[in-house]
Image (cartoon, grey):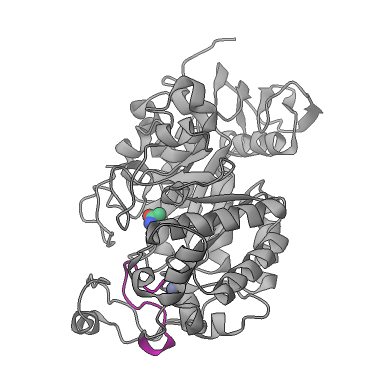
Amino acid sequence: MNTITLALAALTLIPAPQKMSVTDGAFTTNLTVTYTRDAKIPAEGYRLRVAADGVKVWSSDEAGRFYAGETLKQLAEKGCAPLVEIEDSPRYRWRGVHFDDCRHFFGKEEVMRTLDLMAMHKLNRFHWHLTEDQGWRLDIPGYPELVKYGAVRSSSPRHGTRPNFWQSKDQWQAASDGCRYGPFYYTEQDVKEVLAYAKARHIEVVPEIELPGHFQAVLAGYPEFACQPDFANRDPLCVWGISENVMCLGNDKAIKFMEDVLDYVTKTFPYEVVHIGGDECPMTRWKTCPKCQARIKSEKLGDVHGLQPWITRHFVKFLEQRGKRALGWDEYLLGDVPQSAIGMSWRVGHGGAGHKCLTPGEWAAKGHDIVMTPCSHCYLDYAQGLQDDPFQYIGGNLPIEKVYSLDLCAGVAEKDRMHILGGQGNNWSEYTWNEYDLEWKMWPRMCALAEVFWLGEAKPGYADFKARMQTHRKRLIAQNVNCAPIP
Ligand code: ACM
Ligand code: ZN
């Protein structure tokens, strides 16, 4: 057997396997697979041998067996496969894609297509962003007004405009498309279908229910859960940005509402982790709300800064009592929050509605598990540096080479690295209108992240990745994926 390096191999696997040896130039058309369980192989890992007399696969679990199949699909796409031996397993256990169905709604078919593409790239967490200022997308039994008002907004910003929350109503009006958007939401049956589809692809679905900020779509349905129920027309926010209309934390009925929602979510989604948002919550309304002020006094919280940690503690414990773990955007860890709470590190040195920013290394040193989604490398709504790009972006500059350079454990002390669970690509959809737009932004940059999450520090380097990507892009295009070019 002639072992050759990945850089020289004709093989074009994405993500590249941890270890591979190739019998140079030899192929087989005998693709009969024999499977053997081997308890010594790491979780989600596999061994794959393609020989003249057929294919042998070993794994310790079903996920590993499934990933051997995904590797074989790429090897054998022309009906024959090169003779290879592969030993492979993931460096990180959280390999995620975030999907914002709120600013724009993509629907079940695009969710399932994303799940197919995730499986192809050995990605295993689908972070489903279901609630926002601009739309609520999940039907909740007992709260019919949520989708009646929260799942439809009276207008959105037109293509090419950039109105924001802090601008005047006149500026909003001038940028408005005047088109009713929705109602768009998922029923219990839709969720069941998505869960079954994801499970068959070894993907856990992580629902996100935002609290206490990014809450205006709830308030469209139930204005009584606001500090000051005085905002427009029972409408979700019709511009992008952060609404100051947040959850009133002095109102027991608002808290009971969230308990009911999360109780339903814990029963509907079978996995351990539930995302409770926590990012970018303005405290403006709490400062003048008599109910919030009364809560600060009765719970001895000091001032408005004590309110969010108080509600976070409540829901971290609430989820724990139901056998679940809370995950949230990193600022929700500020204050005295239990160590069991997982953080999603997204901010790189900036505040997010004025909150203090800690590095992933600092969070990990405090004992929190962390999922890495730094906006510097993982925000796929940032521009990708293409000439003549037909699509609009939220801003930023994130070419694929920069995405590939992400090091999830950079700045994290050796002793704390076990807290870095993995990473995730985020697909915020303010400036993403439909599936063509979404796929263009996600692929091929998500391929780079998939390789970073799978191989970690063992990734072979951008030049090697880019060479393999030329073929892999054709593979994606053959599946009708609107994959952007590689600059
Ligand atoms: C975020 O980007 N607001 C988490
Ligand atoms: Zn209040």
Pick whichever, 171 or 453, lies toward us. 171
Would you identify the image quadrant in which residue 465 lies?
A: top left
Pick whichever, 151 or 471, lies toward us. 151
As drawn, the residue found furthest toward the top would be 1
Seen in the picture, residue 191 relative to 154 is either above or below; the reply is above
As drawn, the residue found furthest toward the bottom would be 233
Q: Quadrant of the C terminus?
A: top left
Q: Tell me residue 119's x, y (percent).
A: 59, 46
Seen in the picture, residue 311 relative to 474 is either above or below; the reply is below
Q: Is residue 141 magenta?
A: no
Q: Quadrant of the N terminus?
A: top right
Q: Which residue is drawn at the image coordinates 57% and 47% (left, top)?
A: 125
Q: Tell me residue 384's x, y (percent).
A: 28, 48
Regarding residue 15, the answer to whether it shows in the image is: yes
Q: Tell me residue 277's x, y (percent).
A: 48, 58
Regarding residue 278, the answer to whether it shows in the image is: no
Q: Is residue 234 magenta?
A: yes
Q: Tell me residue 15's x, y (percent).
A: 50, 34
Q: Quadrant of ligand 1?
A: bottom left
Would you identify the image quadrant in which residue 259 lies?
A: bottom right
Relative to 247, 243 lies left or right: left
Tally of numbered tags: 0
Q: Which residue is drawn at the image coordinates 42% and 76% (left, top)?
A: 290
| SS assignment for the magenta stretch, majority | loop
The residue segment tinted magenta is 232-246
Q: Which residue is drawn at the image coordinates 38% and 74% (left, top)?
A: 245
Relative to 294, 195 lies left or right: right
Seen in the picture, residue 366 relative to 113 is either above or below; the reply is above
